[in-house]
Image (cartoon, helix red, strand yellow):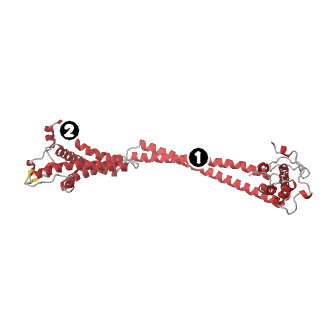
Amino acid sequence: MKLMDKLEGASVRNLFATMPDPVDAGAEIAPQNALQVGTHARREGETYNQYGLRVAGLSEGNPHTLLPCLQSVYFGIRKEQEKDASLQEELRNKLNTKKADLEAERQNKNAEIEDSQEQQDRLSTEIEELKEELATLRHGTKERNSKAWITLIISSVLLVPFSIYFFIFYSSVGYSAFFKQFGIGNIENGDFVLSQAIFDSHAIPNAWEDGFAELMFILFMPFIFLAFGFVLNRWEREKGWLKYIKIPALIAVAFVFDSLLSFEICKKIYDLNAMMQLGEVPPYSVKLALEDPTFWIIICLGFVSYLIWGFVFGFWVKAWENLDLNPEMRRRMEERIEDTKKKLETERQNCQRLRAEANAIEPKIKEVESQMGVSARYDIAKIKLELNNFFAGWQTYLAALGKTSVEKQEATNLFKQMIESIKVVD
């Protein structure tokens, strides 16, 4: 049902004349008949809360009279504000200030856009210069890195004898641990000759005599530990947290493997020496191994050595990669180009955002200019405040009169429709 339909049959026609629907705040529409003069008009010094309470009493809280009352109050406040020269000047100054602020904001946005465009031009130029330098590096002559060359020579000198040492050591240790049988002939002056267990010059010929499989086992065992050193180096060069788990695990596996080889050799030596003892000798155990210097000597000769080999191999690989300065310089140049492209894209997005913000200011300026062109301006916030005060007085009377919740809700709905019809232009 429309608001005007609710006015039909109003019981207080002598109090208020029928009013038009609520209108926009900027429209120049006057009521056909505002509040009647006399006792029904707002009295001098009377607040709108008191006024609403009195008028509600005159109409006995009839909801059909609420809308014309609210409209009369609305147009009455408008007339008051039209006649208030100081308020009109204040509102005019506010509009001027708001327009100046918006124009200043637009100017700042335009300045930021210009700076962003200059930044984009600078980054674009930088990218082109870096691409030209990269092309020169790709087609230029190789430039040797003297420091890397020296490191490569030293690490090569160390790796060759280290690799030969590994082959001799682990072929001998592997044969002693898995195939060699220690006997009385290995004892000189009542003690076992340790060097025969660690460095056996006949390990390969003896393995050949034992069989082809034994020979292959002895020949390939050194490569297991060389592979440990190689994998250690590759994992050390990886990025990410996972390498901090894999590297300790690899070292632990290698240490356990070396420990088993050392334990097996030391056990054979211990058992051989035990045969020469007259009394009862306890069996060889882990505790005895940990207290046996031979056990730790064999581990140090193997385990520590291939850790060092892995580090030296890492130096060799890095020196080889850095021997030619051009690839490293190209890599760094490519990284700089990618970083600069990312900065350029970020600056472009920032410029688009600034343009959108600057374009959004223009309609606001035109809106303010349209408000500045009207003959009278209104303080909409104050109008709504007094309407609220008026309705608060009306509600006070409804509560005192004991009206039902349905009647109270009907009055509230009419008031809300009236308030929502008043447009506030920012």
Q: Name which residue lies at 90% across and 52% down.
A: 15
What is the number of the mark on residue 349?
1
The image quadrant of residue 44 is: bottom right
Q: Amino acid at mark 1?
A: Gln
Label 1 element class: helix
* Res 17 seen here: yes
The image quadrant of residue 76 is: bottom right
- Tell me where residue 380 appears, x and y as whole percent: 78, 54
In screen coordinates, is 341 left or right of 143? Answer: right
**Which residue is situated farthest in the top direction here?**
212
Given residues 43 and 59, the one toward you in this image is: 59
Quadrant holding the N terminus: top right
Given residues 69 and 219, the one toward you in this image is: 69
Q: Amino acid at mark 2?
A: Met
- Tell me where residue 298 appears, x and y as whole percent: 20, 52
The answer to whether residue 204 is above or below residue 381 is above
The answer to whether the residues at label 2 and label 1 have Cβ atoms under 8 Å apart is no
Given residues 233 and 1, the one toward you in this image is: 1
Tell me the residue that label 2 is attached to: 216
Label 2: few (<14), some (14–19) or many (≥20) C-alpha neighbours in 10 Å = few
**Which residue is situated farthest in the bottom direction here?**
45
Label 1: few (<14), some (14–19) or many (≥20) C-alpha neighbours in 10 Å = few
